[in-house]
Amino acid sequence: MPEVRDPVDEAAWLSLAPLAARSVALSLPLSTRFQLRDDITPVQFAFLQQHGFLVFDGVASAPEVQRALAELDAVEQHLLAEGIDKVHGVPVWFGEGPDGEPRLQRMGFASVHSDWLEAFVTDARFEPIRRLIGDDARIGTREKDGVVFNRYFNSGGSLRPGVAWHTDSLRDVFYNGTMPGPMLNVGLHFDRIRPEDGGLRVLPGTHQQGSLSTLFRKVHFYTDDDDPDEVMVETWPGDLTVHDGRMWHRVKASPYTGERSLRRSMYVPYVVDAYAPKQADAPTNAYMRLFHRVIQLKGLRSRLPVRTGRRPRRSTPRSAPG
C-alpha cells in the first residue's frame, strides 16, 4: 500500500487565539506534518513552542531535490580536485564510500561554491521561516557555519554513520560565552527516512529545560542510547524541519550499510545577532577544532584492525563520539 504523508488540514484553525491554538496543538500527534503557508499559523507556532520542532511537507519539489543533490555532488568534486580541507575556517570532513573512495560527509558554507544553492536557500518561499525566527532575522550564508551539508553513510570508513545525543548549547557557549536563547535549526531533507532507517531523533520539550539539564542530562556527542521519550522525525525528500537547538537531539545511525544507509540533509542558518561574516581565511574556532579532533579520532579508530585473542569482547560496544 502507498505510504500516507498527508499534512494536517488547518483550514478551520487559521484565526485561532493563542490559548485555543495551544489546545489544538496539544491534541495533535507528535508525528503531525504541516504545510508551509504564507505565514506561520497559530497552531504551528503553538506546536513549536510546546514540543520544540515542526515538520513541513514537501517544501522543495522533486526536481529541486535532484538539482540540489547534483549541485552538492559538484561541490564535492571541486573540493577534492582543489584539495580544499576547510571553507571559511570550517573543516571539511571526508570519509570513505563503499569502495574506499573519498566521500563528503560534512561541510559548512556549502552555498559558497554554488550560485544555485545560494539562490535556492534565499528563495522567497522561506520568508515565513525567517519571520518565525524574528523580524530582523537574516539568512547567514557567510556567517556562523554557513549552509551545512550532512551526508550520513554507514560503512567501514564512514566518519558519520550518525551523531550522538547533543544540544547546540555548547556551540553557542564557544561562540558567545553565554547560554543561548531560542535557537531554531532549519533543515532541508533529501531522502525518505523511516523509523527503521535511523535518522533524526528529538526529546520533545527539552528546549525548555534548565541550564544543568541542557549541559549534563547526557554526555554531549557520546551518549547514543535509545531514549524512551525520544521521537523519530520521519522525512520525505523535500521536507523542511525546524527544531530548537536547545533540545536534546541526535541522528541515529542506520542499521543498514552501503547505499541503503544514505541520509542527506542541509541546514540553513538564520541569524539575529550582529552581522559577522567570516572571511575566506578565517581561523577555525575552539569548538570546531574540538569537534574536528573527535571526528579524526573516530576515523582513526574505525581503521584500526580488530584485536583478537582470549579476552572476550563487549557484547554491547561502547558508543563512539558523533
Image (cartoon, helix red, strand yellow):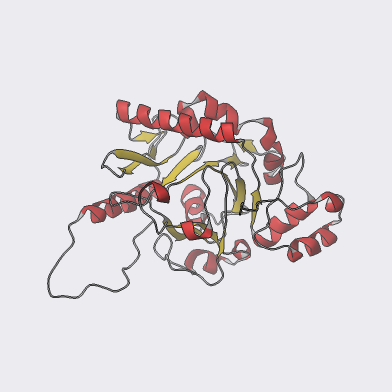
Residue at (87% x, 50% y) in the render: 15
Residue 273: image location, x then y, percent = 61, 41
Q: Quadrant of residue 85?
A: top left
Instruction: Identify the residue at image location x=33%, y=49%.
Output: 159
Q: Which of the pair 193/129 is nearer the observer? A: 193
Looking at the rendered image, the quarter that the C terminus falls into is: bottom left
Percent coordinates x, y for residue 235 in the rendering: 57, 50
Whether residue 8 is visible, yes or no, is yes
Residue 73 in picture, x, y percent from top left = 42, 32
**At 36% from the left edge and 35% from the top edge, which residue is drawn?**
86
Residue 277 in sight here: no
Q: Nearer the viewer, residue 210 or 256?
A: 256
* Residue at the spot 81% in from the left edge and 58% down from the top edge: 21
Note whether 94 is above or below 159 in the view shown: above
Residue 43, position in %: x, y?
Answer: 77, 55
Q: Residue furthest front?
A: 1
Q: Is residue 279 above or below residue 26?
A: above
Q: Is residue 4 above or below residue 125?
A: below
Reply above or below: 69 against 183: above
| Side of 134 relative to 72 (left or right) | right
